[in-house]
Image (cartoon, rainbow, N blue to C red):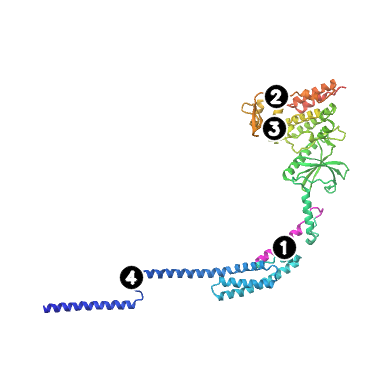
């Protein structure tokens, strides 16, 4: 028992010694190591430390970035502060504004700079920059004074002071001032006969002159581009003196003027001031030249072109002058009863001769009416004028609004390719008006015009309708006429189908009604006129009488018997 106990006690003592040694080693390790042993509390403290370290790193990065941006942005902040102080100190002296600039820049530098030393360095640089700017201002003022613009710059400095910007901005302003001077030196007086830019300096071109010139320029034309006519104006290098306004049309206005070279009266057609009218005028000049070349002896009763020129951006055509247009003649001598038979026959012959000349050179006038026919003072010579709508036969395209509406042929309204027949139709309408003093067809629209045609001539031929580009606007699939009307209650447009067309007018009775106390010979002549008009007013242009056949008709050939 004792031996075994001794052994056991020895063994226990050994184990206790070992444990005590281990405890000592662990204590020594704990004392030597800086970090505590792992535990749940220690783990949370480590995480907090790592987060703090990351936040410190981010703060350091932000500080470095802020310092860089502040260094880069300080020149722009200085500029903005200088501009702000200049806006506030417009009426103050320059020295006071510069002090405010310094104070503002120092405040900005304090706010932007991370330390005091950096802001002090910037304020010193700023004083150097301000000094440089003072010198640059002086140089600029000297340059402007040498160019004769010092007064303008002083006025500008009174109203808005020269901003304290960088040298580049001053260079830009000086370049702009130089270019402005060059432009002023190059501008000329539009009313002068010579170019004065090479003779006179820019200081003689005053602002008052430019204002008066602009006002005069505005007074040349009205809102629609027509030339403002002033009686007594001398145009085209003192060649023509304007006497009166004769009339105004879609393309131009016409004045009567005196040719100071020959003392003859001329008519000047002044085209409207726009590109379309200019091209139309050039086209009319070409047509008139061809007519003059085809009629050197002036026998075919088309107005003669004597010249053309440009005045105040308006194309002007110089034409031979006659006394009045046929519309005025009818109002004065043939109101409600028409002209006498002799004048009617003479005027008809002259109109047909003009159509023969147009056909000879392959042109269509496309606007024959009493307004475009002029008569001399003795009322014995008639001429066709206003060739602004004229075109070659092969160059035309279907359009429903060619020719004035009362004188518009059915093929134009229906959109059928047209030729010389449209002039024959318009001439027939004009002849009826000369004979009666009344307009033959008075429809207020293309649709009503077709109704007027059928009231006089009957139903429109089906073969003609098949060719019509605009046929569906006026006729249905059965070729029945669709009369356009307005509903009395709603005011909307409606269509009334007309399946049966009956002739409601008698041309011979209408011609006779306008004349009283006719002799037998005069009545015979009116019957011949009715026959000629019937042939000229055929609905189908292919069946319409030609110009040469019209000139051979009895109404033309037979003289009225006394």
Give the structural element (helix, strand or loop) at label 2: loop
Kindly identify which residue carries mark 4: 39
Proximity of marks 1 and 2: CB atoms separated by less than 8 Å: no
Proximity of marks 3 and 1: CB atoms separated by less than 8 Å: no
The magenta-colored residue range is 168-194
Q: Choose mark 3 or mark 1, whichever is in front.
A: 3
Q: Choose mark 4 or mark 2, whichever is in front.
A: 4
Proximity of marks 3 and 4: CB atoms separated by less than 8 Å: no
Q: What residue is drawn where x is 75% and y is 59%?
A: 184
Q: Position of residue 536 (x, y in %)?
A: 75, 27
Q: Earlier in the sequence, mark 3 or mark 4?
A: 4
Q: Earlier in the sequence, mark 4 or mark 1?
A: 4
Kindly identify which residue carries mark 2: 458
Q: CA distance from mark 4 to mark 2?
A: 119 Å
Kindly identify which residue carries mark 3: 446
Kindly identify which residue carries mark 1: 178
Proximity of marks 3 and 2: CB atoms separated by less than 8 Å: no
Specify whether 66 is left or right of 359.
left
Q: Quadrant of the C terminus?
A: top right
Residue 553 visible somewhere in the drawing? no
Q: CA distance from mark 3 to mark 2?
A: 17 Å
Q: Choose mark 1 or mark 2, whichever is in front.
A: 2
Give the structural element (helix, strand or loop) at label 3: helix
Residue 527, relative to residue 350: is it above or below?
above
């Amino acid at each position: 028992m004792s031996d075994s106990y001794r052994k056991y006690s020895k063994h226990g003592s050994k184990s206790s010694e070992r444990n005590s040694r281990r405890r000592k080693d662990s204590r020594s390790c704990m004392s030597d190591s800086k970090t505590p042993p792992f535990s749940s509390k220690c783990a949370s403290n480590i995480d907090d430390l790592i987060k703090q370290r990351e936040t410190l790193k981010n703060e350091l990065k932000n500080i470095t970035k802020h310092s860089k941006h502040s260094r880069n942005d300080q020149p722009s902040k200085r500029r903005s502060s200088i501009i702000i102080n200049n806006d506030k100190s417009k009426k103050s002296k320059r020295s006071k504004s510069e002090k405010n600039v310094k104070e503002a820049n120092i405040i900005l530098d304090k706010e932007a700079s991370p330390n005091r030393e950096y802001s002090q360095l910037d304020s010193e640089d700023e004083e150097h920059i301000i000094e440089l700017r003072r010198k640059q201002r002086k140089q600029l003022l000297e340059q402007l004074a040498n160019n004769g613009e010092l007064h303008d710059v002083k006025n500008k400095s009174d109203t808005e002071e020269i901003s304290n910007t960088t040298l580049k901005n001053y260079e830009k302003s000086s370049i702009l001032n130089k270019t402005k001077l060059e432009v002023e030196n190059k501008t000329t007086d539009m009313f002068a006969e010579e170019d004065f830019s090479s003779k006179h300096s820019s200081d003689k071109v005053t602002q008052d002159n430019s204002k008066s010139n602009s006002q005069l320029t505005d007074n040349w034309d009205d809102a629609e581009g027509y030339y403002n006519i002033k009686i007594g104006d001398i145009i085209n290098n003192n060649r023509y003196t304007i006497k009166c306004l004769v009339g105004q049309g879609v393309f131009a206005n016409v004045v009567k003027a005196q040719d100071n070279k020959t003392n003859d009266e001329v008519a000047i057609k002044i085209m409207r001031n726009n590109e379309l009218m200019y091209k139309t005028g050039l086209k009319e000049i070409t047509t008139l030249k061809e007519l003059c070349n085809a009629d050197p002896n002036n026998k075919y009763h088309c107005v003669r072109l004597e010249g053309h020129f440009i005045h105040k951006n308006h194309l002007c055509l110089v034409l031979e002058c006659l006394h009045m247009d046929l519309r005025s003649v009818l109002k004065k001598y043939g109101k409600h009863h028409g002209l006498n038979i002799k004048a009617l026959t003479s005027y008809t012959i002259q109109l047909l001769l003009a159509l023969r000349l147009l056909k000879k050179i392959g042109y269509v006038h496309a606007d024959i009416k009493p307004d475009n026919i002029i008569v001399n003072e003795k009322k014995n010579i008639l001429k066709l004028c206003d060739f602004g709508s004229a075109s070659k036969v092969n160059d035309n395209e279907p359009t429903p609004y060619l020719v004035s509406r009362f004188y518009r042929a059915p093929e134009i309204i229906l959109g059928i390719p047209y030729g010389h027949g449209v002039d024959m139709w318009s001439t027939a309408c004009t002849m009826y008006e000369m004979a009666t003093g009344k307009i033959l067809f008075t429809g207020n629209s293309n649709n009503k015009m077709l109704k007027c045609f059928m009231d006089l001539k009957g139903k429109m031929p089906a073969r003609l309708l098949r060719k019509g580009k605009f046929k569906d606007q006026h006729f249905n699939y059965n070729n029945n006429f669709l009369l356009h009307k307005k509903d009395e209650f709603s005011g909307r447009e409606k269509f009334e189908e007309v399946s049966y067309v009956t002739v409601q007018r008698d041309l011979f009775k209408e011609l006779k009604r306008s004349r009283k106390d006719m002799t037998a010979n005069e009545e015979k002549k009116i019957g011949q006129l009715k026959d000629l008009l019937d042939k000229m007013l055929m609905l189908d242009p292919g069946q319409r009488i030609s110009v040469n056949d019209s000139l051979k008709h009895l109404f033309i050939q037979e003289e009225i018997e006394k």
